[in-house]
Image (tube, grey):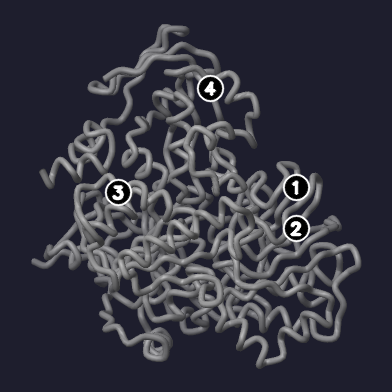
Amino acid sequence: MEAKGSVFKYGDNVDTDVIIPARYLAIQDPKELAEHCMEDIDDSFVKRVNKGDIMVAGKNFGCGSSREHAPLVIKVSGVSCVIAETFARIFYRNAINIGLPIIECKEASEKIQEGDEIEIDFDSGIITNKTRNETYKGQSFPEFMQRIIKNEGLVNYINSQEG
Amino acid sequence: MKKAMTITQKILADHAGLEYVEAGQLIEARLDLVLGNDITTPVAIREMEKINKDGVYDKDKIALVMDHFTPNRDIKSAENCMCVRNFANKHEISHYYDVGKMGIEHALLPEQGLTVAGDVIIGADSHTCTYGALGAFSTGVGSTDMAAGMATGKAWFKVPSAIKFNLIGKPSKWVSGKDVILHIIGLIGVDGALYRSMEFAGEGIKNLSMDDRFTICNMAIEAGGKNGIFPVDDLAIEYMKAHSKKPYKIYEADEDAVYDEEYTIDLSSLKSTVAFPHLPENTKTIDEIKEEIKIQQVVIGSCTNGRLDDLRIAAKILEGKKVDDNVRCIIIPATQNIYLQAMEEGLLKTFIEAGAVVSTPTCGPCLGGHMGILAKGERCVSTTNRNFVGRMGHVESEIYLASPAVAAASAIAGHIAAPCD
């Protein structure tokens, strides 16, 4: 599995309230909800994002609320992967559970800049920065989580176990 | 030889059917309670419908609380509650709480006796960590985890390592649980406990009321913690006996349990503490605030500080005083029982006479839902738990997190003020 796209770069402690403000949480349609993705810190994100693009941030990405709407709107916006130095734990769980690829990588988080062209190989965890001719090694997932990711989320994983 | 474990590790080991677990281990644990609210449950229901399994694992071990955008703030919120109500009826969920019976979930569930020591609880709400005050392992998850929990009665966890906080001494007047946890978050940062347990210990615990402990565990998530947990003492046992018929089990940390870090917090040295915008870690003690920070709103309530102790403190300060003319003071008892008790004690009269408004239980303004949204440039002193950009309204509004004492004193002063003013 691979991802390829240009980068939207954010800082530390990007919280779920700016990823998807609570005032929109009554909306159930994921596409309508995604129209407000990142609105409170980057109101041009929705206009600029293309399918496959990659989000890169600093520490504690997705801190705050447990709202699964946060990884969901990022995924529905077309983002193929989020790279951060660290993720807040509920966001981490939610991303895996809904099948949004995420990678923890301090070096990538520090060196990648807005607009860089990035390729990610999920099997090896290798992140290639084509703009800067650099590669970084992301942390690989424990085998159990890889099984959930390969099933594209917890629901499919449970169904595969039951089957 | 028996290996040492923290309180959290012992609870998780027992619920995974294992003698011993260690930090980093992935386990599947049996759940004693699965919780959701009106925002997260509709998403969970949608996910649950995709699971090839009929029904819920145990209709008595699911709690659905309509507290966030209720009483319904708009048509979409009404439809979301209807979706959950229909689900609750269909599956005969015992603990479904709608307007009239509902309260803010993390104040309501302990009060209703649904959370006791030794439980493993997941909730599709980040502040589910509150129940650690009673010695339960409880943690926030997303809607898909909630769906899986409702269907299977199980959840996967990575066993956390822990930070130990030794609490000593006795807090001075006006210093409460909120100041303790804001101090700790200021100390270790908003990711200081990331993926880890925050375990509290020490003789100072006896000087903290149950409501203080709920507040402290409630905000473990604001330090990135997986859970916050207190040892069970006589006060906790008394609370559980008064509220619950559920059997409880007390787990104690081994004396040689391993902690990543240890801090000693002298409660007697703490001062009223305020977290400045836009992170809970931006803390200052009240005496460090030199400038006059004018405010337009005060909110006293939420799953963090909407309990009876909180209202009593606010009333003590507001008694016979008036809220500043330029301030809207919104007070939200967290549950119907707290509301009723506050009425019987005359607290509501005090609030109304002071010029504050008293609301039905709701999460409302805490997450910028309704019942107290901020305009551009407005400032609010709030007893809630987050001061992120745009959390309570406009992206250029500001939230200052504080205790009920500071909030009440600030409402009177019209600016951020110490309770002794």
Whether A71 is drawn above or below B272: the answer is above
Whether A113 is drawn above or below B46: the answer is above
Q: Are marks 1 and 2 in contact (CB under 8 Å)?
A: yes
**Residue marked by disc 1:** B397
Q: Position of residue B313 (x, y in %)?
A: 68, 81
Q: Are marks 2 and 3 in contact (CB under 8 Å)?
A: no
Q: Name which residue type carries label 2.
A: Cys
Residue at 58 percent across and 18 percent down: it is A48
Q: Kindly give the residue lying farthest to the left in the view shown.
A: B1
Say yes or no: labels 3 and 1 on the same chain: yes
Q: Nearer the viewer, mark 3 or mark 4?
A: 3
Name the subunit of mark 1: B
A37 or B320, nearer to the observer: A37
Residue A2 sits in which quadrant?
top left
Secondary structure of residue under mark 4: strand
**Residue marked by disc 3:** B49
Say yes or no: labels 4 and 2 on the same chain: no
Cα gap from disc 2 to disc 3, whole angstroms: 41 Å
Residue at 78 percent across and 85 percent down: it is B350
**Crowd around label 1: few <14 · some 14–19 · many ≥20 (10 Å):** many
Horizontally, residue B149 falls left or right of residue B307, namely left
Name the subunit of mark 2: B
**Residue marked by disc 2:** B380
**Residue marked by disc 4:** A8
Cα gap from disc 3 to disc 4, whole angstroms: 34 Å
Q: Nearer the viewer, mark 2 or mark 3?
A: 3
Secondary structure of residue under mark 3: loop
Q: Name which residue type carries label 3.
A: Glu
Say yes or no: labels 1 and 2 on the same chain: yes
Name the subunit of mark 4: A
Residue at 79 percent across and 74 percent down: it is B356
From the image, which quarter does the C terminus of chain B lie in? bottom right
